[in-house]
Image (cartoon, grey):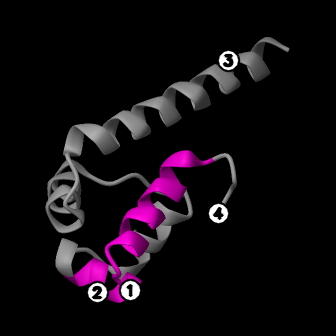
């Protein structure tokens, strides 16, 4: 996991704070183990369905973690446009 991927770190911290293994989190959210791992490694983002389940399973307001995701996307876009203009 990249240190600069705050959303991936946030997702992993939610699971760890909930005292869930990757396997248990996947089962409770209703996704595969690889999907949890990909979220936590910054390779994939959760679907809308998963977003609802994540907020329920981890006991967090969906808007709170979507704000973290939004910030991550904005930062990636900023860096991308900076790289393209160089």
Position of residue 72 measured from the top left corner of the image (x, y, whole percent): 51, 36
Quadrant location of the N terminus?
bottom right
As rendered, which of 54 and 78 lies closer to the eye? 54
Residue at screen point 33% across, 44% down: 65
Q: Main secondary structure of the magenta part?
A: helix
Q: Specify which label sits upstream in the sequence, 4 or 2.
A: 4
Alpha-carbon distance for marks 4 and 1? 17 Å
The secondary structure type at the circle numbered 1 is loop
Q: Secondary structure at mark 4?
A: loop
Camera-side mark, 3 or 4:
4
| Image quarter (top left, top right, bottom left or bottom right) of the C terminus | top right
Residue at which label 1 appears: 21
Instruction: Identify residue for label 4.
Output: 1
Is label 3 in a helix, a strand or a loop? helix
Tell which circle, 3 or 1, labels the residue nearer the N-terminal end.
1
Determine which of the numbered discs, if any, sits on residue 24 in the image. Answer: 2
Point 63% across, 20% down: residue: 78
């Amino acid at each position: 996991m990249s240190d600069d991927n705050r959303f991936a770190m946030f997702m992993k911290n939610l699971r760890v704070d909930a005292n869930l293994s990757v396997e248990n989190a996947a089962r409770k959210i209703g996704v595969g183990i690889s999907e949890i791992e990909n979220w936590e490694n910054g390779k994939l983002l959760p679907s809308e369905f998963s977003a609802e389940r994540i907020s329920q399973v981890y006991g967090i307001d969906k808007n709170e973690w979507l704000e973290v995701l939004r910030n991550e996307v904005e930062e990636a876009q900023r860096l991308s446009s900076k790289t393209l203009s160089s």
